[in-house]
Every structure is written in structure tokens, then in C-alpha cells.
Amino acid sequence: MELFYAKEAHGSVISLDQEESGHCIKVLRHRVGDEVQVIDGLGTMLRCRIADANPRGAQLEVLERVPGFGVPEYHLTLACCPTKNNDRFEWLVEKATEMGVDRIVPLIGERSERKVYKSDRARRIALSAAKQSLKALIPEITEPITVKEFLQQPLNGTGLIATCFGERIGVSEAIDGDEITILIGPEGDFSPEEAAMAIAKGYKPIHLGPSRLRTETAALAAVSAVYLKFIGKAYVSED
């Protein structure tokens, strides 16, 4: 299945932008009358028929809307400090999107080696990963925010912080409910003050096993643990 993306997906007729139209019409050679699938980035897949095969702005007739297409039964925010090597963080964005995440927040911690991060390229990577993994939901990639500023925001659901400080429990054991926020620090971990502030705000300290993990590996391990907890439950219930 090939998915296309339409930023404006309201009404009975929608348009693809120039990039998506070019891929649909020029590269894949779709023609008037062909059926194609389009995502709105918010969780709905639209089954459409091509009405105008313009490679600069294809027009599509909406035949059916499928809400919740490829969307997991949980809401996950991943708040993670970007790595010094930008490619590693972009790899994380891609893989986390494939597994299922609703929001990715680049955090700037006291010990962060990267103090500046531009989110535009990560948004393009998330779009591509969502289409590749057959998901209609494209995660929101926010602008960077400091750890302390982020912790001033209300915590809804379960908050988890991966840290080396104090007693910690496993991810699956710590989750209570289907709304989860995970904090992942920089290469040098959160500062004691940041960790204490998070715990005071209701975040539960978690461990990710005995291995020492890179930032992006730790983040993906946490996302994987959430994914497997909920997806595994779904498959067990189906059997």
C-alpha cells in the first residue's frame, strides 16, 4: 500500500501538494480514475479516486474515511534531549514514529551537549516514516524546550523518567493507563536537580536494563517497551 499525505483533507475533494502530486503522477504514474490512499496526519486515512492528474496539484475525490488508521491504543509523548550527532536523533525520530508516538519534544538539559536544535528536518522524517509504516498519524515534533520549562507543564497520565538516580522500576511495571510521557536525558544524564524536579512533579524513575545505552538507544528501548506492552496485549486478546 502506498500512502500519500494531504495537509488539508476536509471536504469531498482534496488536493495533494506539488511534491506529493509529483510522486503520485510522475513517479508512480497514477492516472484519472485510479484509487489511492491518503493520510491527513491526524489519524484518518482517506480512500480516494483521482479526478485530476495534475502533477503539480492532483485533485482527489474522497470515497471513504477510515479514522484511527494504524494508530495505537495509547498516547505517547517522548521528551528526549537531542544527541550531539544530529543523525542519531533523526534515526530515533524515524524509528519511534514507526512504532507509534504522538509527540516528540526535543529537550535541552543542563548537561546537554547540543543546546540548539531545528525541528524542520525531523518533521519531514516523521512524515516519511509514518507513510512507510502505514500510519495515518504523524507525530507532532515541537520546538526545543528546556527540561525545567517542560516540567512546568501539567503531567497527564503516567510520567516516566529514565535516570541513573535512586530506586527504579521497569517501564511496563510503571505504566498506569494509556497516556504516557517519557523523559530521556542527554549523554551525561539529567542533573540531580532536574531528576528531583521531575520526581516531585510525579514522574516515576525507570530503568532500561543493565546495559549502558546511548541516548537514542535508551529512548527507542522505552518506546519499544510501551509498544510491546499495548500491542502484545492486543494480540493476546485477539487469540
Image (cartoon, rainbow, N blue to C red):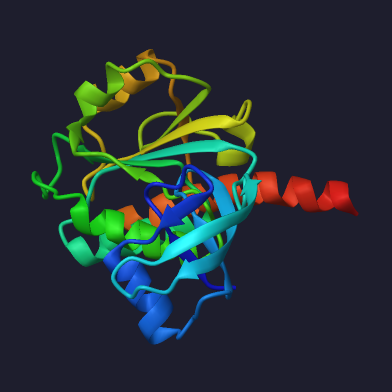
| Residue found 36% across the figure and 32% down from its top | 165
Find the residue positioned furthest to the right: 239
Which residue is nearer to you in this view: 33 or 47? Answer: 33
Image quarter in which the C terminus is found = bottom right
Instruction: Please give left or right for residue 231 compared with residue 166 in the image.
Output: right
Task: Find residue 29 and report its horizontal and vertical position in percent.
Answer: 45, 86
Q: Quadrant of residue 23?
A: bottom left
Task: Find residue 220 and report its horizontal and vertical position in percent.
Answer: 44, 55
Instruction: Please give left or right for residue 165 compared with residue 190 in the image.
Output: right
Q: Is residue 114 above or below residue 53?
A: above
| Residue found 56% across the figure and 39% down from its top | 171
Report the number of discs.
0
Which residue is nearer to you in this view: 168 or 5? Answer: 5
Residue 158 in sight here: yes
Task: Find residue 86 and report its horizontal and vertical position in percent.
Answer: 18, 61
Q: Is residue 230 above or below residue 202?
A: below
Task: Find residue 203 and report its horizontal and vertical position in percent.
Answer: 43, 23
Residue 170 in sight here: no
Image quarter in which the N terminus is found = bottom right
Q: Quadrant of residue 48?
A: bottom right
| Residue found 40% across the figure and 52% down from its top | 218
Q: Quadrant of residue 26?
A: bottom left
| Residue found 36% across the figure and 57% down from its top | 126
